Amino acid sequence: MKVSVSFLKYQNSKEETIKKILDTSADYLHVDIMDGLFVKEKNDNLDEFIYLLKNVNKPLDIHLMVLNPKEYIDKLSILKPEFITIQAEILNPLVYIKQIKDYHIKVGLAINPNTSIEKIAKYFEYLDLILIMSVYPGSGGQKFIPDVINKIKEIPRDHILVSMDGGINDETIKNLKNDLDICVSGSFICLSNDYESQIAKLRK
Ligand code: DX5
Ligand code: ZN
């Protein structure tokens, strides 16, 4: 299982937090972008993200919690991310799935806790990743919703990677390690004083 680290919650500055993540053995940097529409919170200054992330030495795992991803995808493609993940609950996700693929970027579809796998089965053939949200998106540091675990076994694993995002820590990950390709973890790592040892606890 790979570890993707989210820096939505941090102790000092965003810049310092990113730098500290880049100094760990984390597999991906998870980038949460919110538009104030799909979720209440807003942090979608793309020029700032591009400035912060343009020289990072880890693959980027971008999570767009936005209602209309078109411009976000166009602008962020310059960063050559490993994945761009959009939310399944927006209008016409297939349009953006195709837009991401046109940039030769791997495409992920995130599903909120109350969205079923059945509802997104029609997109399976286009997807590289499914991001099972284990909290309602919008903020870091929320409590893990265990019901979503059942979704894992409904996903065809021949070509789709499975990731989980929200409330992941050394306890909530315990029985999941063998079933996930990637776990996203934010506050468990970035609110600690030793990022590397927290990452090791997730993998152990
Ligand atoms: C939730 C975000 C998550 C979150 C993860 O809206 O998509 O990536 O920041 O942070 P923790 O691990 O604190 O739930
Ligand atoms: Zn996220």
Image (cartoon, rainbow, N blue to C red):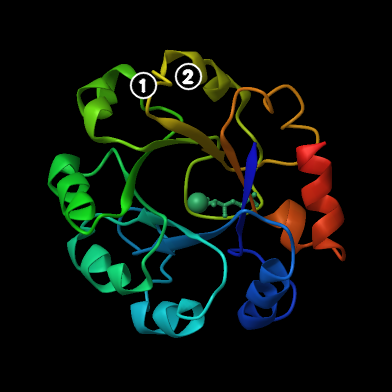
Callout 1 environment at 10 Å: few (<14), some (14 to 19), or many (20+)?
Answer: some
- Closer to the observer: label 1 or label 2? 2
53, 71: nearer the viewer: 53
Q: Are marks 1 and 2 in contact (CB under 8 Å)?
A: yes
Mark 1 residue CB less than 8 A from any atom of ligand 1: no
Residue 195 found in image quarter: bottom right
Task: Residue type at mark 2: give it.
Answer: Lys
Identify the residue shown where x is 21% and y is 45%.
Answer: 97
Place of residue 7 in the rendered image (x, y in percent of width and height, measured from the top left): 61, 64
Q: Secondary structure at mark 1?
A: loop
Task: Residue type at mark 1: give it.
Answer: Ser
Identify the residue shown where x is 77% and y is 27%.
Answer: 174
Above or below residue 143? Residue 17 is below
Place of residue 91 in the rendered image (x, y in percent of width and height, measured from the top left): 16, 43
Q: Is residue 98 left or right of residue 186?
A: left
Which residue is labeled 1 in the image? 116
Mark 2 residue CB less than 8 A from any atom of ligand 1: no
Above or below residue 145? Residue 48 is below
Which residue is labeled 2 in the image? 151
Identify the residue shown where x is 56% and y is 34%.
Answer: 181
Q: Is residue 111 visible?
A: no
The image shows a total of numbered marks equal to 2
